[in-house]
Every structure is written in C-alpha cells, then in structure tokens.
Image: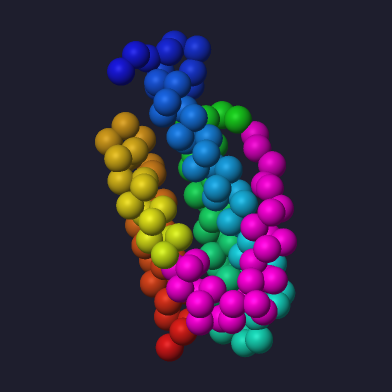
Amino acid sequence: MRRNNKLPYNMTQEQYNELLRSQQGELNAVLMYQQLAKVVRSEKEREAFLQLSREEGRHASVFHSYTKKVLKPKKTMARIMPLLYYILGKKRLYKLIAKGEYDAAIGYEHLIKDFPEVESVKNDEKRHGDIVSGLLE
C-alpha cells in the first residue's frame, strides 16, 4: 500500500476514503435515529433510538479523529426511515436496521489493525443490532 504523507496519520488514500465514508454514515445515522425516535409509539423505543443516536455521534467523532474533516449529516435516511416505519411496519424495518448495524460491525473489522479506536465502534454496532432486534421482543 502506498502511503500519502499529505493525509492524516500517513494513511493510504483508500483508507482515508473509507474512513470518510464511515464518518458520513455514522453522522447520517445520528439524524436517522433522532427521526425514528419522534415517530415510534413506545417510550422504550424512543429512549433506545435516542441512545443509539448519541452513540452514532460518538462513532462519527472517532472517525473524525482520523480524517480531521468536518462533515455534515445527509438527511436522506432521516427522511425515509419514518416513512418506512409506517409503510413496512416496525417488524420489517427493525430487522433491516439491525442487519445494517451487524453489517457495519463486520465492515469495520479490517480497519482495527491500523485504526485501533474503530474496535469500540465495531463492538457498539454489534450491540446496536442487538438493541434494535430486542425491540421486536
């Protein structure tokens, strides 16, 4: 792998791009969970989504510590998720969200060797999948 000295932490361009995509995804998830918290019917779900939103914000800050780039969340998923809540129903939507969280955990695995703080993010993502799945019980 060719390292670029102009990038933070002497990372490759490919790593930098992946960290940026991850940072953006985590920022987008902050808004997504905040919006879901506004439409769910139970206090348990509302509190869970607000907790997940806060933790996704921390994840974005972990990636920011590597990229050093300030990003703004994109509102697409935040707009779509409340609609999907009504269209698909809670059961189908929560299964999709949980799968996304589990997939993110797997997707972060290979970054841990070069970016150790990502391990806490990976562990949280798996736990997030468990939390969302648990809302179906």
Please provide percent x and percent y for residue 105: 37, 54
Report whether 14 appears left or right of 36: left
| Residue at the image position 30 percent from the left and 46 percent from the top | 109
Q: Position of residue 30 (x, y in %)?
A: 61, 57
**Visible in this render: residue 96?**
yes
Image height check: is 79 above or below 132? above
Is residue 85 highlighted in magenta? yes
For the point 41% across and 28% down, the residue is 15
Residue 74: x %, y % from top left: 68, 48
**Quadrant, the N terminus:** top left
The extreme top residue here reads 5
Classified by dominant secondary structure, the portion drawn in magenta counts as helix
Q: Which image quadrant for residue 78?
A: bottom right
The one of 126 and 94 positioned closer to us in this rendering: 94
Please state the extent of the stretch shown in magenta in the rendering: 70-98
Q: Residue at x 40, y 21 (%)?
A: 12
Q: Quadrant of the C terminus?
A: bottom left
Residue at far left of view: 113
Which residue is more in the foreground, 71 or 21? 21
Display colour scheme: rainbow
Q: Residue at x 56, y 29 (%)?
A: 68
Quadrant hosting residue 123: bottom left
In this picture, residue 128 sits left or right of residue 35: left
In percent of width and height, residue 5 lies at 44, 11
Above or below 26: residue 53: below
Q: Is residue 136 magenta?
A: no
